[in-house]
Amino acid sequence: MNESDDPIVAMEWLLDRFEDDDDVAYAEVGAVSQSKTDLVVTEDGPRDELAFDETGVWCRVFTDGAADYRYTTSLDEEALTDVADRAVRGGAFLAQADPARFDQITTHRAVHGGWAADRIDDVSLETKRSILEDGLAATADGLDITRQWVNYTDAHVDETAATTTGSTVRTTLDRASAMFTLSVRDGPTVRRHIGSTRGVAFLDDLTDAFENAADDARALSAADTVDAPTGETTVTLSPRAAGQLFAFVSRYLEADTCEMGLSPFDVGDELGSESLSVADTVKAGSWAARGYDAELRPTTPVQLVENGTVTRLLHNTATAAEADVFPAGNAVHSLGFGEAPRIHARHLEVDPGDTTSAALRDGADVLVERFDEPWLRDEFERVQRSGVMPASALYARDIERKVDDDRPDRGCADLPVAEAYRLRDGERDGRIEGVSLAYDPATLRGVTAVGDARGTVTGVDGKHKSQIPYAVTAPGLRLQATLRSDE
């Protein structure tokens, strides 16, 4: 290969390399061109800002039935040779007990132009900075702020991916997000993540998002801190808090998580009350939406839970072949392509009920507006979720694990309450702190009402070192649950 900074040339070179290697059963290779912006703005003004272009190639290579994943921004022949050799050796090194099956028959040839009407990289860094500064300034009114911070990032991505079995897909993605933190003196800390793949349209949403977060901070600051109830409690979750809970629960519906013995659920099990139905969808413009996944499969909806019963798990092509189901595009790319794709939900849609927000609060003791990150009670689960895993999902079967009966905390977690109120007669009566909602596999069976209004929450989930985008559109809930003191 001649020296070139063209990622498509590098992609084709890698494909030829893998096709000529008798040790390689199958490979996927992607060529990526990105125009990226990273901004950090605080109450004191801009702190870090960077606009840059990046080209690279990623590959997932099956050798001896196992897969290895690599990404590089060095496109010269020497670097690509090293990447290819390492990928082949990495797959063989795993010595996977059950070889993964992959799709050798279906060929995809498609172009997906994304959901952005206008490219996010057509807006200058200066304009983006100004929007963030104006938004932060507007939120300061009436608040004694000790810290105000927004991490903004966006990327316009052009990607061409191909496989050694003849599939070729071209996609375009305009993904942008902002993580906003606002801390009030002697008061709460409010955090919000907002993300979109709608391109320039995302910038129009930022000011309203900042103002809404500031309104929440004002309401929390104005409320006196009161003692939180503990033990069995009637709890109302806002759509945001419910969305966070469903995002957490969906991790137990990933096929590789089940293979590792971490999930308390399987198809046919009761996950929650009959009023709960959950689908994993591909919502146009959603933060987690893409037309094709990392395996070049078209992304299609999956009904995960119907009337409280688990009807389907989340699969990639290998686990879908084992389960004799059709893959729906759930091999989700990690943000930035630097880590392996993982089986994950994209945009969860939880069906609404018919209970108004006021009726949800009626008779409840606590209103939870937002949770912090869950804390897993099972040490084995904590270690496995945070550790590095190969890019072959079926390797999960080979992990030496304890017998499930010896792990009573499997599938259990404490969800720290970050923003919440004590309720009396359906009205807010003081802010509560220092408690967590105790989740176990029976918690969602305690749902007694589902709201008629829904909201969307976005975020990033860490899975085996990969950073996976997710979104959830969910209604509020009322449920019987246990609250525990954090002391």
Image: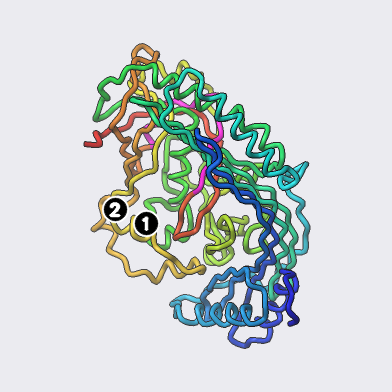
Q: Give SS at disc 2.
A: loop
The local crowd at label 1, few if under 14, some if 14 to 19, many if 20 or more residues have their Cα within 10 Å, is: many
Check contact, mark 2 vs mark 1: CB within 8 A.
yes
Residue at 64 percent across and 33 percent down: it is 131
Does residue 456 appear to the left or right of 310 in the view shown?
right
Work out whether 68 lies above or below 48. below
Does residue 144 appear to the left or right of 287 in the view shown?
left
Q: How is the image coloured?
A: rainbow
**In what quadrant of the picture does the N terminus appear?**
bottom right
Q: Quadrant of residue 84?
A: bottom right
Relative image position of residue 336 (x, y in whole percent): 58, 57
Residue 432 in view of the camera: yes
The disc at residue 378 is 2
Does residue 293 appear to the left or right of 353 in the view shown?
right
Q: Quadrant of residue 164?
A: bottom right
Q: Of the two numbered discs 2 and 1 on the same chain, state the one appearing first in sequence.
A: 1
Work out whether 126 lies above or below 339. above
Residue 451 on the magenta span: yes
The local crowd at label 2, few if under 14, some if 14 to 19, many if 20 or more residues have their Cα within 10 Å, is: some
Distance (Cα) linking label 2 and label 1:
9 Å
The disc at residue 86 is none
The disc at residue 262 is 1
Most frequent secondary structure within the magenta stretch: strand
Which residues lie in the magenta part?
Answer: 444-460
**In what quadrant of the picture does the C terminus appear?**
top left
The residue at the far front in this view is 44
- Three-letter residue code for mark 2: Asp
- Three-letter residue code for mark 1: Leu
Residue at 34 percent across and 49 percent down: it is 411
Relative image position of residue 33 (x, y in whole percent): 70, 61
